[in-house]
Image (cartoon, rainbow, N blue to C red):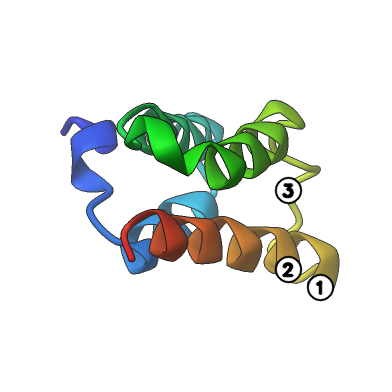
Amino acid sequence: MDLETSVVDSQTLRRHLMAPNPMQRAIALHALEVEVERLPAGDRSLGNEVEKFVSRGIPFYALNDPHYCSWVGKAASYWDKLHA
């Protein structure tokens, strides 16, 4: 399965970022990065914000850690903003 193309909305992005497989999480974060590249040239402020978020990488994976869950929520929120 091509995980990058399987991320089609914020719910699937969230599911992939919460997955126990680290490669699945990395590919999901890359899918968010690809969405930034698809932005029209006039949307650079959001693009820069998402690029900064993505550049920090994936924090330590702890499924029940509130900080990790908050990070996943922020990634999903960025996905929604990119598609608004």
On the image, the x and y values in percent for residue 33 come to: 47, 31
Q: Which residue is pictured at 40% across the width and 54% down the height?
A: 82
Mark 3 lies on residue: 61
On the image, the x and y values in percent for residue 56 come to: 77, 31
Q: Residue 70: which disc? A: 2
Measure the C-alpha gap from mark 1 to mark 2.
6 Å
Q: Nearer the viewer, mark 3 or mark 2?
A: 2
At numbered mark 3, what does the secondary structure look like: helix, strand or loop? loop
> Depth check: 79 or 59 in front?
79
At numbered mark 1, what does the secondary structure look like: helix, strand or loop? helix
Q: Quadrant of residue 84?
A: bottom left
Q: Which residue is pictured at 74% across the width and 71% down the height?
A: 64
In contact (CB < 8 Å): disc 1 and disc 2: yes
In this view, which residue lies farthest toward the front?
Answer: 42
> Depth check: 64 or 55 in front?
55
Q: Is residue 80 left or right of residue 54?
A: left
Q: Quadrant of residue 65?
A: bottom right
At numbered mark 2, what does the secondary structure look like: helix, strand or loop? helix
| Image quarter in which the N terminus is found | top left
Q: Does label 1 or label 3 sit earlier along the sequence?
A: 3
Measure the C-alpha gap from mark 3 to mark 2.
12 Å
Q: Amino acid at mark 1?
A: Pro
Mark 1 lies on residue: 66
Q: Is residue 72 left or right of residue 8?
A: right
Q: Does label 3 or label 2 sit earlier along the sequence?
A: 3
Badge 2: residue crowd in 10 Å (few <14, some 14–19, many ≥20): few
Q: Is residue 81 left or right of residue 69?
A: left
Q: Amino acid at mark 3?
A: Tyr
Q: Nearer the viewer, mark 1 or mark 2?
A: 2
